[in-house]
Amino acid sequence: MPTPSMEDYIEQIYNLIDKKGYARVSDIAEALMVHPSSVTKMVQKLDKDEYVVYEKYRGFVLTEKGKKVGERLVFRHELLEEFLKIIGVDDENIYADVEGIEHHLSWNSIDRIGDLVTYFKASDSRVDELKQVQLTNKD
């Protein structure tokens, strides 16, 4: 089970590989706002735990285990963003809020949030009703 810090790295590596076809230490360091040496240490740890295959001076790739975890982490992040949008959280707060809560929710909670997102997306009237409740509660 990866730690929250490991999850951040796996998610970032997954996203970079998905977008660019590769992930470099410098790209990860920039995205996570950490020193390249910190990235190298974490990549070595991820290699030890079989999330990546790392070869000194040659780079690294996600293992099947790493890809599966990365995919799940990206799903969690996107689901939470979608949920916060549906419930009316201001756009400028969404990213920071997701970053703040994503590691603190169980996968059971994530699945139930997924159920709520599915419920609200099934009918526009449900989102409209929620907005009416929010307007009523502003007073």
Image: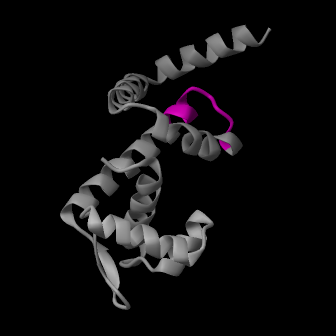
Q: From the viewer's side, name the closer residue of 106 and 57.
A: 57
Q: Residue at x 48, y 34 (%)?
A: 104
Name of the residue lying farthest toward the bottom:
57
Q: Is residue 99 above or below residue 34?
A: above
Vertical order, 84 against 53 (above or below):
above
Task: Identify the residue at image location x=48%, y=78%.
Answer: 25
| Point 63% across, 66% down: residue | 33
The rendered magenta stretch, by its main secondary structure, is classed as helix
Q: x%, y% of residue 89?
A: 64, 32
Quadrant including the C terminus: top right
Tell me the quarter of the picture where residue 113 sits. Answer: top left
The picture places residue 101, in percent across and down from the top left corner, at: 54, 36
The colour scheme applied to this rendered structure is: one colour
Q: Nearer the viewer, residue 76 or 25?
A: 25
State left or right for residue 49 relative to residue 101.
left
Residue numbers of the magenta segment: 82-91
